[in-house]
Image (spheres, rainbow, N blue to C red):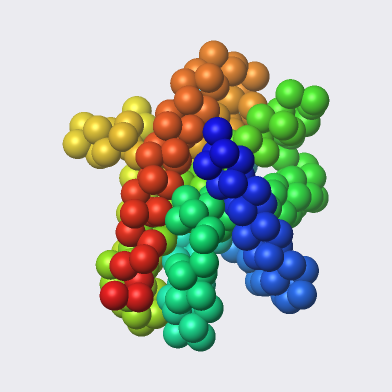
Amino acid sequence: MNYINQVLKKSYFMAEMEVRKLLHDPTELATRAIQPILWLGIFGEALSKVRAIPTHGLTYLQFITPGVLTQSVVFTAIFFGLSIIWERDMGVLQKFLVSPTPRLALVWGKMASAGVRGMTQIVIVFLFALLLNIKLNISLISIPGTIVLVVLGSGFFTGLSMIIASLVKTRERFMGIGQVITLPLFFASNAIYPIQIMPQWLQVVANINPLSYMVDGLRSLLVSNSPGQLPVDIGILLVVTFLISLLSAYMYPKVVV
């Protein structure tokens, strides 16, 4: 119990430190707003005129809004691994590793910080959806549910990015591999088209892709009014996020090796 309390307390301090960095330099929020605006304002608007993709009674812009939110969160979280490479180069990471702070707290702190950044993406996407007159279900259930899914999704992909950083060890390699991983994960999901229209082999990939469960949960809450699968989506994200946090904590010291 003492260990768990220590992990939670140190995780909070680590997350607070990361959030202070964000408040000190809020320009990152402005640059992160560009991507969802482009996807909804250009890609979504263009394909909504084609009407070739089955969206089960939704407009195409409604259909992809949860996918665009997921993509924005993932692309923000996946580059958290870059920060630990930078911290290693500045000598900060070595100080963390020789401190009594549990490795799991270092990882959970990063995950929580990514969750805060993810919540800013919720605000950006919701505001732009309002501007485009995209009808979303905004309620006392959908807002907390959206936050839970975004925090879990941010945590999973932050953990994945930290594992990648511990393996590649350089910023240049990380940038290349980060793009190679995130784009296939995004396109091999239900973010911009239904799984049912994919080739059989791609359906298998999409069904084991954590990103698909995040999109599915957000779509249930925000546009489809059918939360039947929501507990499954949250449960799967919770399990994979916890597991990847354990692996990240194990791999974390290897960044300096």
Q: Residue at image x 79%, y 45%?
A: 130
Residue shown at 53%/58% (left/top)?
101
Counting from the top left corner in percent of width and height, residue 155 is at 52, 48
**Residue 80 position (above or below residue 128):** below
**Residue under the point 77% across and 31% down:** 138
Location of residue 33 by image quarter: bottom right
Is the residue 69 above or below the residue 14 in the image? Answer: above
Q: Is residue 14 above or below residue 172?
A: above
Q: Give the residue furthest to the bottom.
A: 90
Closer to the camera in the image, 115 or 175: 115
Residue located farthest toward the top when viewing the structure as drawn: 228
x, y percent for residue 144: 72, 32
The residue that appears at 31% across and 34% down in the rendered structure is: 208
Residue situated furthest left in the rendering? 201
**Residue 255 is at least partly visible in this image:** yes
- In the rendered image, the quadrant that contains the C terminus is bottom left
Total count of labels: 0
What quarter of the picture does the N terminus occupy? top right
Q: Is residue 248 found left or right of 100 in the rendered image?
A: left
